[in-house]
Amino acid sequence: LFHTVKGGTDEDTILMLLTSRSNNQRQEIKAAYKKAHGKDLVSALKSELGGLFETLVVALMTPPISYDASQLHKALKGAGTDDDVLIEILASRTCAQIKDIVKVYKKECGGKLEKDITGDTSGHFQKLLVILLQGSRDEGVDEDRIENDAKELFAAGEGKVGTDVEKFINILGNRSHEHLRLVFDAYKKLAGSDIEDSIEGETTGNLENLLLAVVKCAKSVPAYFAESLNGSMRRAGTDDQTLMRIMVSRSETDMLDIRACFKKMYGASLYNTIQRVGYCDKLLLSCTSS
């Protein structure tokens, strides 16, 4: 890798070297490079690269939790808050991952994540984000609460004039995914429609998007990301940042499941779909080979 950087940048070789290793192995390469050459590998690569390829390589060289923390910091500290990034990360990560993100954010980004989120958001959207940020969902399934939770959700939405958003936030933000899946089944029997229909009919804007993301992740995180990837490629012009962020962050987590969900949901392979929209072929190497 040193010779690749020193002797002129060969992007294909760099990507082949990086994507054929796990993230842990990349961290070992980074440490070995610094020990052997007295230089930071990421800085050396950045000096030789540019554009989306540079962004991709830096992302691949970053530990997963640090990458999530950096994406949240960027979403909060950029020009305007990128609510979609806050929603994607906080709705999809496990409780343990969120607790680690909070610690790493403080160490590497120089601030408290909760303080930064409350400073940039408001209302019910803020409240649900803060609840998710605690990383303290209930564990397991509480059989005695399933029917009651379903009834409370129905009464809070379709069963009344106006919406009791607090009920939605409390139940969706605190129950385990396993429990919520059973609640959604009970809700459908009670209401004759899916919980998503109620959310779409009763809420709007970023709160609606966050509630829907929480529901979709409770049902299936891979299916949620398959839908997000499809959405990033259906817009006028590919949403490069969303596509890259999901592919990098899920490459060693559930990419095989995401690929299977994508094929089932859209009748085409993820690889071919990315290729068809003309996105950087190098991204294909990094993410669909996992």
Image (tube, rainbow, N blue to C red):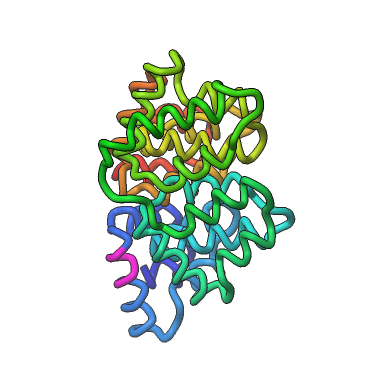
The x and y percentages for residue 27 are 34, 70
User: Is residue 105 at least partly visible in the picture?
Assistant: yes
Q: Residue furthest right?
A: 79
Q: Residue at x 52, y 43 (%)?
A: 169
**Is residue 6 left or right of 129 when viewed as pictured?**
left
Q: Residue at x 48, y 57 (%)?
A: 133
Q: Nearer the viewer, residue 170 or 28?
A: 170
Confirm whether the magenta stretch covers residue 274: no
The mark tally for this picture is: 0
Q: Tell me what residue is drawn at x 50 percent, y 41 percent.
A: 243
Tell me if I can see residue 62 in this picture. Answer: no
Quarter of the image for residue 31 reads bottom left
- Write down the region rendered in magenta: 24-28
Residue 238 is drawn in which quadrant? top right
Instruction: Compare residues 147 and 254 and report the one nearer the observer.
Output: 147
Decide whether the magenta segment is chiefly helix, strand or loop. Answer: helix
Residue 73's x, y, as percent? Answer: 58, 63
Residue at the location (42% across, 48% down)?
A: 174
In this picture, residue 86 sits left or right of residue 269? right
Residue 92 at x, y percent in the picture:
42, 46
Residue 232, compared with residue 132, is above or below; it is above
Image side of residue 136 versus residue 256, left or right: right
Image quadrant for the N terminus? bottom left
Query: Is residue 26 in the magenta section?
Result: yes
Q: Quadrant of the C terminus?
A: top left
Residue 266 is situated, as x and y percent measured from the top left of the image, at: 41, 20
